């Protein structure tokens, strides 16, 4: 998911940076004082999760956790992911500094989409519906991110369908793992602290 | 009253579980030491060929990835595709700095510059050295004598050249594991210090944001 330095053209980089800047602003505005620690903890979890690579499939992939971040943070996922990606770029040389905007948007936008799509459903009284939508949340977030990465690369690579298929297939194991992980997190949080689910 | 206690207890459980989750993640990192999502391109010269190896930072080879070779000005000299072992090799196109660019799948990219000094001198000679002097016709006795000397000198020269190249090849071969070892050791491995440092930064940023917000309130 981390697009490297020097791959994308300037218009794509600028568009990504601009979109991210706006969304981070919205996220910071919407972030309550009491929720700042929660944002920081999820940011740390995201920062570490990229180091856990999934040894399945043809390419090198890792956990992303944007589904669970979305459902817990909503728009606040943007600042959380931006901070984590910045630190990853500086400390681990993942991705790049110029691609921060695009990378943040590719990961955080699906998180926000999942917040609005699944935020209510994961709180549903019927636990089957709640857990199924939790799986969907983890799965769809990674799927959307993969498609967005392919979209960013469209100006570099020859064919969108080919790239999209490659990225999506490579991340299929991650989608399933994150779906299951989100089910566990939502199941657990639903029991101990239902009020933090869905924003 | 009872509800209050219950709530406190449950938030305690929540905190403890988060801590466990955190500890678990940390352990996973330190155990596997695997960092994905970066590609590494490494290249070395052996004889008249440049060899390259490309891999993701978790050790997985970059298969069927494009490698382009540029000169310092930016002209593309050649390009190729890595094999299943992530390797690609090509004949030295000229004695200049070579900039190798690897483009792997999903927006991964790496560069490696091979300085001209690392390219063998023998390469230069191979092109610049004139071929053996043509023997002149109808030479006087003295000339014939000199011609013989030249031949002997040439033979010795050729032998020396051969010995040198055989020697270089043998040394290259012997050094190969060493070169690879050095390249491996130069790889940037994610250390526990950096992971903990990164989390520290995030908590620090949290502190700053909370401080600024609390002043506003």
Image (cartoon, helix red, strand yellow):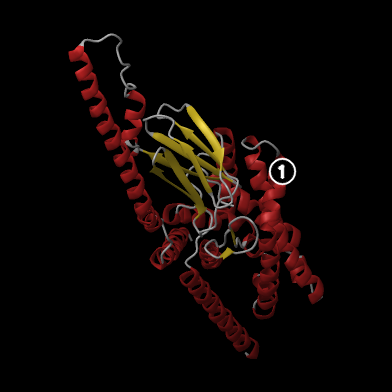
What residue sits right under mark 1 in the picture? A162
Count of picture labels: 1
Residue at the farthest front position: B141
Q: Is residue A25 visible?
A: no
Percent coordinates x, y for residue A184 in the rendering: 68, 74
The disc numbered 1 marks a residue on which chain?
A
Placement of the N terminus of chain B among the 4 image quadrants: bottom right
Quick one: A68 or B96, which is closer to the camera?
B96
User: Who's the residue at 60% across and 46% down the image?
Assistant: B64
Q: From the viewer's perspective, is residue B125 above or below residue B32?
A: above
Kindly indicate the quadrant of the structure image that contains residue A55.
bottom right
Rendered position, B100 above or below A86 = above
Q: Is residue B133 visible?
A: yes
Q: Which residue is painted at 23% across and 28% down in the image?
A: B153
The reply, left or right, for residue A147 in relation to residue A19 is right
Question: Which SS class for mark 1?
Answer: helix
The residue lying furthest to the left in this view is B142
Rendered location of residue B138, percent (x, y): 28, 8
Give the residue displayed 63% in from the left and 35% down from the top. A155
- Crowd around label 1: few <14 · some 14–19 · many ≥20 (10 Å): few
Q: Quadrant of residue B126?
A: top left
Q: Residue A72's spot in the image, x, y percent?
A: 64, 65
Counting from the top left corner in percent of width and height, residue A134 is at 73, 68
Q: Nearer the viewer, residue B131 or B201?
A: B131
Q: Is residue B134 left or right of residue A103?
A: left
Q: Is residue B31 above or below residue A71?
A: below
Task: Pick whichever, A145 or A128, lies toward us.
Answer: A145
Q: Quadrant of residue B97?
A: top left
């Amino acid at each position: 998911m981390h697009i490297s330095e020097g791959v994308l053209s300037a218009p794509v980089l600028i568009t990504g940076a601009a979109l991210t800047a706006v969304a981070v602003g919205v996220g910071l505005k919407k972030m309550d004082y009491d929720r700042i620690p929660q944002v920081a903890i999820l940011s740390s979890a995201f920062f570490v999760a990229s180091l856990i690579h999934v040894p399945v499939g043809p390419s090198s992939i890792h956990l992303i956790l944007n589904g669970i971040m979305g459902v817990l943070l909503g728009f606040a996922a943007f600042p959380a992911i931006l901070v984590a990606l910045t630190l990853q770029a500086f400390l681990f040389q993942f991705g790049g500094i110029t691609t921060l905007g695009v990378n943040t948007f590719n990961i955080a936008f699906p998180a926000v989409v999942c917040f609005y799509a699944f935020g209510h459903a994961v709180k549903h009284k019927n636990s089957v519906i709640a857990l199924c939508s939790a799986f969907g949340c983890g799965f769809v977030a990674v799927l959307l991110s993969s498609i967005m990465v392919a979209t960013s690369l469209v100006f570099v690579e020859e064919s969108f369908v080919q790239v999209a298929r490659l990225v999506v297939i490579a991340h299929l194991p991650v989608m399933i793992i994150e779906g299951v992980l989100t089910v566990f997190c939502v199941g657990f949080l639903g029991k101990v602290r239902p009020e933090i689910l869905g924003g | 009253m009872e509800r209050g206690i219950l709530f406190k207890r449950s938030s305690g459980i929540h905190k403890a579980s988060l801590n466990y989750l955190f500890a678990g993640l940390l352990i996973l990192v330190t155990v596997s030491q695997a960092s994905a999502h970066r590609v590494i391109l490494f290249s070395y010269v052996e004889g008249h060929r440049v060899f390259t190896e490309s891999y993701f930072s978790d050790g997985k080879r970059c298969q069927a990835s494009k490698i382009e070779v540029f000169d310092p000005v930016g002209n593309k000299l050649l390009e190729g595709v890595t094999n299943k072992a992530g390797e690609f090799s090509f004949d030295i196109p000229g004695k200049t700095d070579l900039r190798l660019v690897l483009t792997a799948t999903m927006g991964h990219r790496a560069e490696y510059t091979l300085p001209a000094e690392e390219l063998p001198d023998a390469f230069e000679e191979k092109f610049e050295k004139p071929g053996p002097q043509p023997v002149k016709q109808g030479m006087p006795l003295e000339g014939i004598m000199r011609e013989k000397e030249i031949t002997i000198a040439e033979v010795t020269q050729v032998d020396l050249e051969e010995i040198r190249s055989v020697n270089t090849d043998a040394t290259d071969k012997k050094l190969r594991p060493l070169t690879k070892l050095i390249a491996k050791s130069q790889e940037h491995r994610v250390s526990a210090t950096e992971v903990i440092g990164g989390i520290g930064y995030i908590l620090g940023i949290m502190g700053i944001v909370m401080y600024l917000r609390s002043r506003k309130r």
